[in-house]
Image: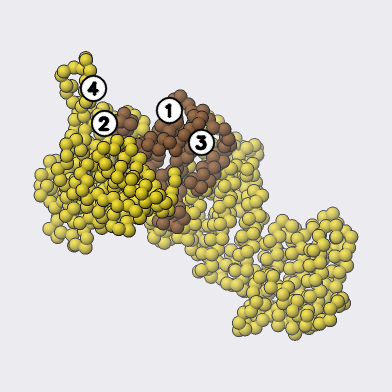
Amino acid sequence: SRQVASQCQLLQSSLGRLSSPQLPQLPDEPVSLQDAPGGLFQMPPGDPFPERVTVVWLSVLALACALVCDPQENLSLAEITLRRLAPRLLISLRLLSPGADVLLRQDAADALLDRLLPHGQMLFLNERFLQAVDREL
Amino acid sequence: MLCCGSCRLDGKFVELLQAVLCSPKSPEQVQVLCAAILREMSPCNDLILRCDEIQDTKLLSLVSSVLLAQGNKKGEVAAVGQRVVKVLEGRLPEGQSALLLLPVLANVINLSPESLTKEQTDAVSRKLADWLRYASTQQGIVQPSGGFFSSPRTKQPAPVTEVDGAIATDFFTVLSVGQHYTQDQWLNVQAFSMLRNWLLFYGGQEGKAPNPDDKPGMDRSVTSMVSTTSTSSRLLPPKEHLREKAFEYCQRLIEQSTRRPLKKDDGDLQKACLIEAVTIMDIICKQDSSYVYRAVSFLKILHGRICGDATYARALLPIAQFFLNHSKLAAVDSDAIYKHLFTDIPAQLFHNPSLAFEFVQFCKDNSQLFTDTSSIFRQSFPNLFKFLAWNSPPLISEFVDLLPFLLDAGTAIEIFHLLLDLPCLTAALDIQLRAAALPTSEKATNDPAVKPATCLEAFRHPLYKSTFQHLLRTRSAPEDTPESLIPLRQLLGSLAGNPRVVQCAETVPVLLELFFRVVAESADGSLINQLVVLLLQRSDQLYEIPTFKDDVYRVLSSQLPMLCKLHPALVVELSTEILEFSGAVSNIQSKEPIFTHVVWAVGEYLSVSYDKRCTVEQITRFFETLEAVLFEITQLRPLASTPSCAPRAISVLMATLTKLAARSQDLIPRVSMFLSKMRTFVQSPAVTSVYCEEDLEEILIRATELMNLLKMPSVAQFVFNPPMDVPSTRLQKEVNDSLPLALRMVTHLLEPAPGCTPV
């Protein structure tokens, strides 16, 4: 997560944006991910993962999410998965409201991950399937 | 998330958690929580969980997640694998589905593929093939919610549609759309999601030779997009049967992935599916070459369809990989595909960070392509650097891996220039993007006499256009000299503060060091000479970013000792250039590190021991030049124009002059006289105000030691001109710092009594 944070900061500065220290309010509409900064980078074997991994990351408002993938995995799918996970996590964990008690909402995060990333496996879900998942949650 | 390396929970608590997890009376939420805690605390020695008897798929999934996190010290992975397959093979209890178990299985094969037997993989392969191929093509029915006014008639299920709304006329896939989904359709999604790994681990031949009865491409060619009911393939063994179904699935997906989706986000999934399908086809063809003929024509058509669409660019990589792997077998010419990939894509889409990353990975995975000097891959290296120039932070480590493959005697000079101009490339790319966004009606001035006011104007200006084009070239062009970049570099100065440019500049020192390390392994004298000359030239021609120049000077100067060691004769061979460089006093201030190391190199290597062609005249000429420089910077009453110099420069000049005098002893009196004047120099009021006390003392001490050395010319000669066959000692190391030690030793020899003052 240290690496993701520095990559995010570097990307932000390259785009000429200043990082805002205040936490933004949770918007009413679904969070738009069009311009959300994100990226890919590799980490060599050793620290902290024993094998070489590719990290796919995404930053939404004040939260950064990262998926750690094997180098051969489908990175396009990883990006799609992240873009679906991040806003749902934000909403279900109510991370941006005051007094967010994230640790007590472990089951909400678990349920979400269990559906979208069961046992860490990415799924090729089209939008309608995703809606069905949302209905179940 | 808490991440403990080992279980620190009390044994009793662990026992309790396990009991609650497995108890049928526990509510599901609590079970999930127990499993989560046990997972987080893994690996846990107190775990007694077993999955052998569990029938309930939900519980099995939870327990498996805990067991698979234990690090497989007690064969947990195999145990889970066995149990899951057993449950899948058997008849599932009412209301249960295999849905929860497939991800577990996917995890098992990732962790330990050898934990399943051939019988088991065959059984699963059969099921996978069915789920992939025979899922229902009708939409699922909503469970009626009951209630007072629910209609007694159940609605007729509608057929699934494609992403563009058309009714589906072929079998169900992940790109099929419906309002609600049936169980088998969910299984279809999960089966495809794990298909790649499954085929990778279990689809291969396992050492068996391919079946000689298979006629390549004859009785299994599918000419239409709609698959025939291939009842014949049901008679195949499970592995081959799955292979056939997987291939058909991929073909269908590829056809579906170029439809225009109604929902924009489905478009992203289409591209991901396309990439996956091509990759799986590649795997299948590797495992059974009879599929190659079917795949090749199919993929060529696909390539034709998507190569002009930037949104499909990432899919071009697995397609190119496929042709790299199989085109020889199919005797197909795929050069056009590679050319388009390496010439057009980096130039147009360098700014797409995901594509940039994957493109560079592709290059690394196929690094052997770059060894052929005439190939399109090798020739396109200027294009590849655009990815790095624009996306520096994530790609620098990838380029550190890739650079050695691009570098050899033929490309070294061009790459040297390219690295030094990498931040300029970033600036130029920025301008290129902005220029492309301008409406075409805005015409830049065509009058060469009118200077461009901005970089943007310069982009189309006749004076600068060709320079931009050189910088933004897509192919290697070693014959074009980049001297013309000088005015452009100045013009681009306005972008020197651009964050991307700055980030790019930070990667250059790393790459330069790597460059020299690689070049040193195989460079011959001629290349080294060229590099040194360029090093001196380019030190004047660098992009004006403050820390950039300092860092580049630091790296370049540190390479000089190494280059001299590899090719000691360079000082003699390049005496003209080095004389010119070291004679310019301005170089001391603007490029002190390089100046210092050059002068040091002269002192070390201008000697017959290193090159028989070194003449007394040469030594004298260098002596006089350096003497003049030292004279100018050590004036007692410095003029306003006299640069204040780093003390290191003064020291190294004195040392070099001494070394040269030791070799041509007529010069000794001149040096001695000069050195004796240094006392006056360091004590002069104008000088003490400029330099600090320690530095001046250091200079004086050095001058004294050098003078003392010259009083014993034969010793001096030995110290400064070691015979070549004497094994190198610390005295002969090419580090500046060892000289003071040597000098102090000699001084002690000469003046055992303390407190002697120099004559």
Quadrant where the image shows the N terminus of chain B: top left
Q: Can you tell which quarter of the image residue B315 is in?
A: top left
Residue B406: where, in percent of width, then height? 46, 59
In contact (CB < 8 Å): disc 3 and disc 4: no
Is residue B644 left or right of B61 when viewed as pictured?
right
Residue B181: where, in percent of width, then height? 24, 31
Determine whether the residue tagged by mark 2 lies in a helix, strand or loop. loop
Camera-side residue of B554 and B83: B83
Foreground: disc 1 or disc 3: 3
For disc 3, the marked residue is A62
Residue type, label 1: Pro
- Residues under labels 1 and 3: Cα distance? 15 Å
Residue B391 shows up from this direction: no
Residue type, label 2: Val
Q: Which chain is brown?
A: A
For disc 2, the marked residue is B177
Q: Can you tell which quarter of the image residue A121 is in?
A: top left
In contact (CB < 8 Å): disc 4 and disc 1: no
First in sequence: mark 4 vs mark 2: 4
For disc 4, the marked residue is B145
| Same chain assignment for discs 2 and 3 | no
Q: Which chain is yellow?
A: B
Residue B753: where, in percent of width, then height? 84, 81
For disc 1, the marked residue is A30
Residue type, label 3: Ala
Determine whether the residue tagged by mark 1 lies in a helix, strand or loop. loop
B311, above or below B561, in the image: above
B38, above or below B478, in the image: above
- Residues under labels 4 and 2: Cα distance? 23 Å
Quadrant where the image shows the C terminus of chain B: bottom right
- Residues under labels 4 and 1: Cα distance? 28 Å
Residue type, label 4: Ser
